[in-house]
Image (cartoon, helix red, strand yellow):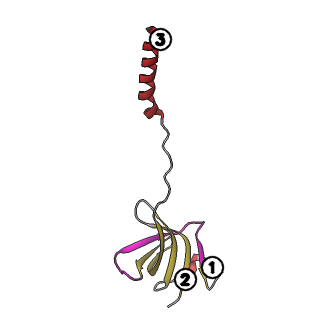
Amino acid sequence: MRKIYKILLFSFLFSILIPLINISVVQAQLILVNDKYDVIKIDIPKNRIEALNYKKKAGIVYILIDGYTKIYQNEKSVPWTRIKVRDVIRVKGGVTWDFKVKAKEIWINKN
């Protein structure tokens, strides 16, 4: 009988303590972006571009640029300072939790 109580006590404590020591899992980016945007403003100190969706023209979207972002123009890799206001760019990347676009690739199309 004592053995059953020990097993029940252990299983009860185990079921209570497991959620307390559980390690949270890193969550992946779930929403992918592959859209065209009109560049409105380039914010170099914050490494981002303010843009409007090319078709919808609804709301400003912030496109974040980091060291892993690749930028292309005419099939050649270029620095991101080549992007100018009123350029049309195609952005491939993902959406962050605060609804900014984190760019993986940017293709510059001149107007």
- For this orientation, the residue located farthest to the right is 76
- For this orientation, the residue located farthest to the bottom is 111
Magenta span covers which residues?
A: 54-71
Q: Residues within 10 Å of mark 1 (few under 14, many from 20)?
A: some
User: Residue 78 got which mark?
Assistant: 1
Residue 1 drawn at (x, y percent): 43, 8
Does label 1 or label 2 sit earlier along the sequence?
1
Residue 78 found in image quarter = bottom right
Question: In the rendered structure, are the residues bearing label 1 and label 2 in contact, judged by CB atoms less than 8 Å apart?
Answer: yes
Residue under the image location 48 percent in, 33 percent down: 21
| Callout 1 secondary element | loop
Q: Main secondary structure of the magenta part?
A: loop
Name the residue tied to disc 3.
3
- For this orientation, the residue located farthest to the top is 1
Question: In the rendered structure, are the residues bearing label 3 and label 2 in contact, judged by CB atoms less than 8 Å apart?
Answer: no
| Callout 3 secondary element | helix
Name the residue tied to disc 2.
108
Residue 72 found in image quarter = bottom right
User: Relative to residue 1, is residue 66 depicted above or below?
Assistant: below
Q: Amino acid at mark 3?
A: Lys
Residue 92 drawn at (x, y percent): 52, 72
- In front: 98, or 19? 19
**Is 17 within the magenta?**
no
In the picture, measured across the screen, residue 17 lies left or right of residue 109, that is left
Q: Disc 3 versus disc 2: distance between alpha carbons?
A: 72 Å
Residue under the image location 36 percent in, 80 percent down: 56
Q: Disc 3 versus disc 1: distance between alpha carbons?
A: 72 Å
